[in-house]
Image (cartoon, rainbow, N blue to C red):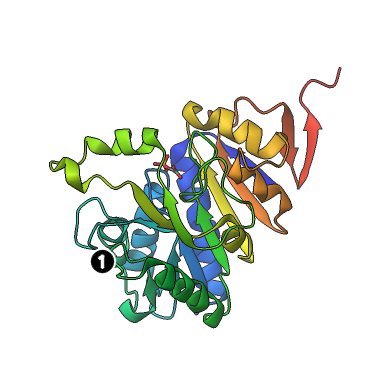
């Protein structure tokens, strides 16, 4: 694992942007896996800037998003489709037919999940998958207890997630209880994963993910099995690590 610790959220976003921009420049027809949430917003702002000021070309990319709420149409403000278009895709020159986000209103969800998996295969797999991490160690909507070999499927949201989301919805009936999510197994097939974590709130999950045992109780710990996991942390997210990670190796901080 390549673990980089930078000062703060700004530096983390800048470093993540370098990695993604380098990938797009090296292979303009890359397949990139995108994530939602607060963490990648700074990265997306920098990608927009690179497009607008330096002509970074998104037109040949194929994209796959990690997850989407079941029951929300793409135009709903809380949908991840809406997040992706408003935070990134509307501001760069993506080709709409090559953008993939699970459809929360699919008639047959199981069939849709299988189609999503097939589309990833047909695109030749994901070159670079951007990932956030939940404070409980989830990746995408693979909550603790998710199979580490799982594929794209429907998952029940934890009661905590449902509770946390309720404040964003005027109509309580619209608060999602399920999501479609790429599986841990799907995510781990990406050529490279880029896991980003910022802030003290993530420090316990990061400690368990990088230095704890591989366990379905911390689905993100599966990055230990990945052939090229790149982890970028800010100092707060890294604050509970017992090891100093550098150049793909780890040495105890306190080796007296
Ligand atoms: P966040 O979410 O980036 O909003 O913290 C990450 C996640 O829960 O996967």
Toward the viewer: 181 or 22? Answer: 181
Toward the viewer: 43 or 133? Answer: 133
Q: Which residue lies furthest to the top in this view?
A: 256
In this image, 60 relative to 220: left or right? left
Quadrant occupied by the C terminus: top right
Is residue 28 something that shows in the picture? no
In this image, 236 relative to 212: left or right? left
Q: Quadrant of residue 121?
A: bottom right
Q: Position of residue 86 (x, y in %)?
A: 25, 58
Toward the viewer: 157 or 193? Answer: 157
Q: Where is residue 11 in the image (x, y as percent from the top left)?
A: 49, 42
Please report the residue visible at 42 percent of the width from the left and 73 percent of the height from the top.
111
In this image, 135 relative to 106: left or right? right
Q: Is residue 191 above or below residue 223?
A: below
Toward the viewer: 4 or 227? Answer: 227
Q: Quadrant of ligand 1?
A: top left
The residue labelled by disc 1 is: 90
Please report the residue visible at 36 percent of the width from the left and 50 percent of the height from the top.
178
Is residue 246 something that shows in the picture? yes
Q: Residue furthest left?
A: 170
Q: Is residue 156 above or below residue 244?
A: below
Q: In this view, does 38 lie above or below 115?
A: above
In this image, 191 relative to 129: left or right? right
Q: Residue furthest right?
A: 256
């Amino acid at each position: 694992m390549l673990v980089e610790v930078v000062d703060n959220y700004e530096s983390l976003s800048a470093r993540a942007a370098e990695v993604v921009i380098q990938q797009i420049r090296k292979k303009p027809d890359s397949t990139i896996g995108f994530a939602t949430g607060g963490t990648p917003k700074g990265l997306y702002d920098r990608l927009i800037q690179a497009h607008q000021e330096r002509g970074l070309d998104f037109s040949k990319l194929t994209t796959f998003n990690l997850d989407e709420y079941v029951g929300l149409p793409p135009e709903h403000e809380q949908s991840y489709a809406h997040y992706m278009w408003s935070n990134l895709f509307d501001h760069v020159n993506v080709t709409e037919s090559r953008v993939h986000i699970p459809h929360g209103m699919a008639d047959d969800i199981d069939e849709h999940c299988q189609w999503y998996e097939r589309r990833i295969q047909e695109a030749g797999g994901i070159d670079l998958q951007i990932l956030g991490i939940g404070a409980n160690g989830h990746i995408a909507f693979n909550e603790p207890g998710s199979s580490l070999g799982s594929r794209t499927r429907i998952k029940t949201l934890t009661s905590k997630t449902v509770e946390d989301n309720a404040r964003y919805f005027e109509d309580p009936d619209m608060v999602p209880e399920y999501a479609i999510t790429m599986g841990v197994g799907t995510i781990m097939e990406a050529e490279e994963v880029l896991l980003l974590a910022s802030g003290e709130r993530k420090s316990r999950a990061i400690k368990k993910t990088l230095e704890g045992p591989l366990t379905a109780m911390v689905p993100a710990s599966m990055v230990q099995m990945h052939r090229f996991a790149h982890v970028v942390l800010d100092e707060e997210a890294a604050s509970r690590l017992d090891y100093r990670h550098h150049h793909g190796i780890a040495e105890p901080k306190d080796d007296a």
